[in-house]
């Protein structure tokens, strides 16, 4: 007999399989010796009050063993002689589009402007050590995209747009830990993600697909209003039956290329703000109601949403036990992001704290839709941040209490940000819509979350790449561009996804659409 049960247990009980067997035997009124195995299939934490509990879904095997092998299983066919589909970008959207195309018998040819993971690591080390930014190989560009060196958060609210479970299983099959199939808010960790990406690369290559690194796309081949190929910076031309644009939200050159070719773009709402960093033990005490975390609870996270003048102010990409990193993609700009390892064992917790920016908020030509107003706003703010840092990657920073109250900081607390900090009155030079909006939003958060607004926390500028300010419009049914056939905008750069999971799901959807349209 196989029985599935829901259990509500203490943190200590949740981590002791023998104790769980005793609880289950009592629940089923059977002798514990009859329980051959017990497998946790769902896990979440309820920390709404001081009596913190784990909610578990368990599969109980009574009088019979587990017959299926644990883990996820996939078999990818040889597509070396299949029709070619070109994929621009090797981030989550591009990689998952490639895997699904292989399942459908197509040969994916990925063209990635950056380098493979092992080489990319050296360029990232140069950012920290020498403040040298390679515009094609950095935290944003390269194998795996921006997600490779990130927390690897796998939670998404876009659950109606695709098969979330399958994406998790594919990641697990390629080396991600089994816990991602169980936890309500799964994550992989920056120490594990790179080898998962390498494993995905090997699957694509072993199946007959191609991946070309250091291959920046500079033009599209369009014939009879159809995308049929791409041109690289060195003049090399690749042909295919379709082109998937999975370039990420930082590929400004691709937006410029599309605009130059007369391909339709549109402005969209996005968000800009700062990174806020606290000691992790302080966040633990806040979220766990004054108690120390203990051995059985993870580093605490948080999620805040407030409204300021009918505009959203919210936390973004919260990284428990993590660090802040310089994720600029070009010299002369300063952009911050957060990441954390799989154990989330660092001393600090950081999160973006951002405010909604709408197309109508920005200067531009009011007589027409200025699709690049948001990109210019991003770029100018990132350049201003770099200048405020003395033309370095030292992040302009201010104690959180001082930022909220509009006063300068005399000194700064310790931080996870390796290049270092420089004291700066962010409340004075951030654009009014950002600075004052964040101040009001943080005040509201502080009223509801006692201890969050503290001198032990620091605000760092700027967090500007939450999503793209530009959308590449596509047909809602076919997912093709509304103007150019066989062109499939995909993932974060298309404006239709945000984060690893929604981008991966979008990649699979686009691949399926190509199969349905051109089989």
Image (cartoon, rainbow, N blue to C red):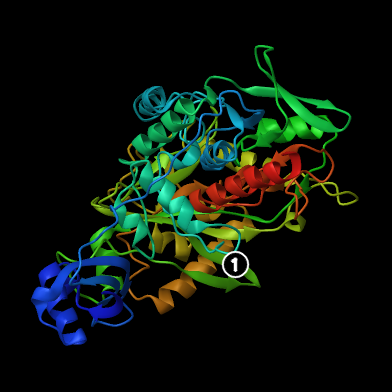
Residue identifier under label 1: 312
Q: Secondary structure at mark 1?
A: strand
Which residue is drawn at the image coordinates 34% and 58% (left, top)? 457
As drawn, 219 above or below 148: above
As drawn, 48 above or below 474: below
Give x and y (percent) for residue 145.
Answer: 50, 36
Q: Is residue 135 visible?
A: no
Q: Taking 33 as reference, is 181 left or right? A: right
Q: Residues within 10 Å of mark 1 (few under 14, many from 20)?
A: some
Give x and y (percent) for residue 134.
Answer: 50, 23
Which residue is drawn at the image coordinates 22% and 76% (left, top)? 290
Q: Taking 231 as reference, is 323 left or right? A: left
Q: Nearer the viewer, residue 124 or 425?
A: 124
As drawn, 352 above or below 250: below
Which residue is drawn at the image coordinates 34% and 38% (left, top)? 420
Location of the C terminus (image quadrant): top right
Give x and y (percent) for residue 186.
Answer: 37, 58
Location of the N terminus (image quadrant): bottom left
Choose top left, top right, bottom left or bottom right for residue 194. top left
Q: Is residue 253 visible?
A: yes
Q: Nearer the viewer, residue 311 or 248?
A: 248
Give x and y (percent) for residue 53.
Answer: 25, 78
Q: Taking 72 as reference, is 205 left or right? A: right
Which residue is drawn at the image coordinates 52% and 56% (left, top)? 427
Choose top left, top right, bottom left or bottom right for residue 300. bottom left
């Amino acid at each position: 007999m196989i029985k599935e049960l829901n259990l509500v247990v203490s943190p200590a009980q949740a981590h002791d399989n023998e104790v769980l067997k005793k609880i289950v035997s009592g629940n089923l009124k059977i002798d514990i010796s009859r329980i051959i195995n017990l497998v946790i299939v769902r896990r979440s934490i309820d920390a709404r009050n001081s009596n913190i509990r784990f909610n578990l879904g368990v599969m109980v095997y009574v009088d019979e063993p587990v017959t299926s092998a644990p883990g996820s299983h996939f078999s990818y066919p040889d597509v070396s002689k299949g029709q070619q589909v070109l994929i621009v970008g090797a981030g989550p959207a591009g990689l998952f589009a490639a895997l699904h195309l292989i399942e459908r018998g197509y040969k994916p040819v990925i063209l990635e402007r950056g380098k493979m993971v092992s080489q990319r690591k050296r360029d990232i080390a140069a950012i920290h050590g020498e403040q040298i930014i390679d515009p094609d190989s950095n935290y944003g560009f390269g194998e795996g995209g921006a997600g490779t060196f990130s927390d690897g958060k796998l939670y998404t609210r876009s659950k109606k747009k695709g098969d979330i479970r399958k994406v998790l299983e594919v990641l697990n099959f390629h080396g991600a830990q089994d816990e991602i199939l169980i936890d309500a808010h799964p994550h992989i960790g920056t120490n594990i993600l790179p080898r998962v990406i390498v494993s995905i690369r090997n699957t694509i290559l072993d199946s007959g697909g191609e991946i070309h690194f250091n291959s920046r796309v500079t033009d599209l081949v369009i014939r009879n209003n159809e995308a049929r190929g791409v041109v690289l910076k060195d003049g090399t031309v690749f042909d295919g039956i379709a082109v998937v644009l999975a370039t990420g939200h930082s590929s400004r050159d691709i937006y410029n290329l599309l605009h130059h070719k007369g391909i339709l773009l549109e402005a969209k709402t996005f968000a800009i703000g700062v990174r806020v960093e606290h000691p992790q033990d302080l966040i633990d005490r806040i979220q766990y109601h004054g108690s120390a975390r203990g051995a059985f609870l993870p580093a605490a996270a948080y999620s805040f949403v407030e409204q300021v003048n009918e505009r959203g102010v919210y936390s973004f990409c919260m990284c428990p036990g993590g660090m802040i990193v310089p994720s600029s993609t070009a010299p002369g700009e300063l952009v911050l992001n957060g990441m954390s390892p799989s154990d989330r064992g660092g001393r600090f917790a950081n999160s973006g704290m951002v405010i909604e920016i709408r197309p109508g908020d920005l200067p531009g030509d009011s007589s027409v839709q200025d699709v690049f107003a948001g990109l210019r706003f991003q770029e100018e703010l990132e350049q201003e941040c770099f200048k405020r840092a003395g033309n370095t990657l030292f992040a302009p920073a201010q104690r959180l209490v001082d930022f909220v109250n509009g006063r300068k900081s005399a000194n700064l607390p310790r931080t996870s940000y390796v290049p270092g900090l420089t004291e700066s009155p962010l409340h004075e030079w951030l654009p009014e819509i950002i600075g004052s909006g964040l101040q009001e939003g943080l005040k509201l958060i502080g009223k509801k979350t006692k201890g969050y607004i503290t001198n032990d926390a620091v605000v760092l500028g700027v967090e500007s790449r939450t999503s793209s300010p530009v959308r590449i419009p596509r047909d809602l049914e076919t997912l093709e561009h509304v103007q150019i056939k066989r062109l499939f905008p995909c993932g974060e750069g298309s404006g239709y996804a945000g984060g690893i999971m929604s981008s991966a799901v979008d990649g699979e959807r686009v691949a399926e659409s190509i199969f349905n349209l051109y089989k």
